[in-house]
Image: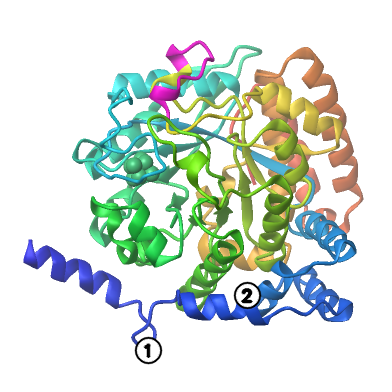
Amino acid sequence: EWANQVIKQSQIDKYLINGKDFINEKEISEKLKLCKNNDKNYIRNIIEKSKSIETLTPDEVASLLNVTDNDLWEEMYEAGAEIKRKVYDNRIVFFAPLYCSNLCVNGCKYCGFRTNNKEEKRRILNMDEIKKETEFVVDEGHKRMIVVYGEHPLSDIDYMCESIKAVYDVKKKSPNGNGYGNIRRVNVNAAPMSTEDLVKLKNVGIGTYQVFQETYNRNIYKELHPFGPKSDYRWRLYALHRAMDAGIDDLAIGALFGLYDWKFEVMGLIYHALDLEKQFGIGPHTISFPRLMPASGTSFFSDTKYLVNNDEFKKLVTVLRLAVPYTGLIITARESPEVRDEVINVGCTQIDASTRIGVGGYSENNGKQYKEKQQFMLGDTRSLDEMIKILAKKDTITSFCTAGYRCGRTGDKIMGLLKGCVEGKFCKLNAVLTFKEYLEDYASPETKIVGEKVIQKEIDEISNLPFFKEHGLYNKLMDYYNKISKGERDVYL
Ligand code: SF4
């Protein structure tokens, strides 16, 4: 026990700068108190800095969070959308979550999975069940999945690796045409682990590793995580630093909004992103900002004084968009359709659809939600096909691209390409190819009609852009496109 503690401590302390953690509550609170400058020119200069795809400083972020002028907020919403277009164009990426187990040894006061919640029906999927769930997700047309595990000895690193392999093993004939479907990128949401276990996770071929700090405020963290391994704030705070050392360089940070003051949590996320940039030269691949939802066996949702309303939510997403312009932003189905549609516009890049979060929920629950079998209740249960059609009508192209990490465009390579707005060029081509696959294999007739129009528009645009002609990419695209029409799958640039 003592030896383990020493090893654990050494895996935290090595990331301190001048002996200090990167989160300093006093400093954050002071900045939020002092950086209140509603001079329009001052705020507009910060907005311009974001538009040139530069990460903002904590002072600048605090100033944006404190803006009280509605016209300036409108300018910030527009800038968010502009930055998103500049870095990610008109694309949106879809993924599906897969909850593998709801066994957990922790006692997080806001979560239905906590060990002392007797209402929760516990379960861990075996490999056959994981494959069955994956088949359901593949049949919807998904190519990216995030696997989610509670923290428990039964869902240890060996279980995780085995279950990720089980997901990758599934290959299924598509309902339309002659294609097949499979999951080509598995991202992981799992408890913080040691560098040695993270190496095992890397070797199994994961995409992104995601750990949310929940709250960056130490006192609140301590109160809400009273026991279990998760009660160690600092072990969690440096989980992604260890992942970098283990060679996983696509990392996802997040905070659970509703546990503490939303402005403080945005600042915490920014300090986290900046520390990763400073120590490894690579910021987070994505940032998530889930809002607290009601869960089984707890009245925490009705009791907390920190719930974030829709207006504040839009503001916090916008500030994150401006603060870390190169990073993907994820808005999940826990939000209502109205909120998602609104917030996508200010710069989100990834969403889920056809989502079920009950353990076994895809293949067994007939689309229904059961509070006692899931971590929280979903707000948006629209299908992938429906979402794609809605977005296509707004000229948004759905991308199922998973080429980046398979071509080694991860970590600092993808950061550089995103900051220089170059990665977007590859993504534009791969979006066309993967969307074409979806339309051939899974789309309803109506979605196919709207989707084909979007693809044609994209191809016309690509044919007129010198970059694609000069590098022979337009011809290559059309070659691959024709291959897909003839039944070939998973071709990418
Ligand atoms: Fe377990 Fe995560 Fe829920 Fe906490 S939030 S009880 S760690 S599943």
Label 2 sits on a secondary structure element that is: helix
Residue 392 lies, in percent from the top left, at: 81, 32
Q: Nearer the viewer, residue 423 or 354?
A: 354
Ligand 1 is in which quadrant of the figure? top left
Q: Is residue 240 magenta?
A: no
The residue beneath circle 1 is: 18
Instruction: Give the farthest residue toward the bottom.
Output: 18
The residue beneath circle 2 is: 32
Q: Nearer the viewer, residue 235 or 95?
A: 235
Would residue 485 be visible to someone looking at this image? no
Residue flagged by tag 1: what amino acid is it? Asn
Q: Earlier in the sequence, mark 1 or mark 2?
A: 1
Residue 214, located in which quarter of the rendered image?
bottom left
**In the displayed structure, would residue 235 be above or below residue 24?**
above
Residues under labels 1 and 2: Cα distance? Answer: 24 Å
The crowding category of the residue bearing disc 2, from other C-alpha atoms within 10 Å (few below 14, some 14 to 19, many at least 20), is many
**In the displayed structure, would residue 246 be above or below residue 465?**
below
What residue sits 36% from the left and 24% below the top?
Answer: 130
Residue 327 lies, in percent from the top left, at: 63, 59
What residue sits 62% from the left and 75% below the top?
Answer: 32
Residue 139 lies, in percent from the top left, at: 55, 18
Magenta residues, as a range? Answer: 363-374
**In the displayed structure, would residue 289 be above or below residue 96?**
below
Residue 355, located in which quarter of the rendered image?
top right
Label 1 sits on a secondary structure element that is: loop
**In the displayed structure, would residue 275 be above or below residue 167?**
below
Left or right: residue 233 compared with residue 320: left
Residue 179 lies, in percent from the top left, at: 60, 19
Left or right: residue 275 compared with residue 347: left
Residue 49, located in which quarter of the rendered image?
bottom right
Would residue 372 be visible to someone looking at this image? yes
- Location of the N terminus by quadrant is bottom left
